Image (spheres, helix red, strand yellow):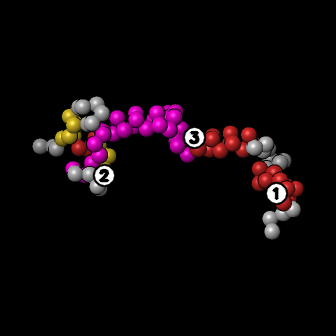
Amino acid sequence: MEETKICKDCKEKKPLTEFYKCSSCKQGVGGVCSQCYIIKYRKKYDYVPGRTRADSDKVEAEKLLVRMGYELNNDDNPIHLQFLRRIQSKYGGLD
């Protein structure tokens, strides 16, 4: 017989295979089933289907660079050169 556990969020009794593994937890699995865990963290990371957290971080980084005055996606004026020019004009170089 397969072991089961009640999810703390949805209160449904589910097999342990439907929970993420947790080495510090009593039964070796977390208290929330994988479906509830995903729903919970979709909200936390502003989840968009097909987009990973790394993609989300990239979008935030791009927004920040634009606010700082950098021009993105220009092969003739790449960001690293814009940065170096800014350092050169402000501090006289990277010494």
Separation of disc 2 and disc 1 at Cα? 46 Å
Is residue 2 visible from the viewing direction of this image?
Answer: yes
Of mark 3 and mark 1, the one earlier in the sequence is: 3
Element class at badge 3 = helix
Residue, disc 2: 22
Separation of disc 3 and disc 1 at Cα? 28 Å
Please rate how many residues cluster around mark 2, counting C-alpha atoms within 10 Å: few if below 14, some from 14 to 19, many from 20.
Answer: few
The extreme bottom residue here reads: 95
Which residue is found at the position 28% from the left and 31% from the top?
10
Which residue is found at the position 20% from the left and 40% from the top?
5
Image quarter hosting the C terminus: bottom right
Can you tell which quarter of the image residue 9 is in?
Answer: top left
Q: Is residue 28 magenta?
A: yes
Q: Which disc is residue 30 wearing?
A: none
Q: Which residues are magenta?
A: 27-55
Q: Is residue 95 left or right of residue 42?
A: right
Separation of disc 3 and disc 2 at Cα? 26 Å
Q: Position of residue 65 (x, y in %)?
A: 72, 44
Q: Position of residue 58 (x, y in %)?
A: 62, 44
Q: Is residue 86 left or right of residue 45?
A: right
Of mark 2 and mark 1, the one earlier in the sequence is: 2
Can you tell which quarter of the image residue 14 is in?
Answer: top left
Residue, disc 1: 87
Q: Which disc is residue 56 wearing?
A: 3
Q: Is residue 18 left or right of residue 88?
A: left
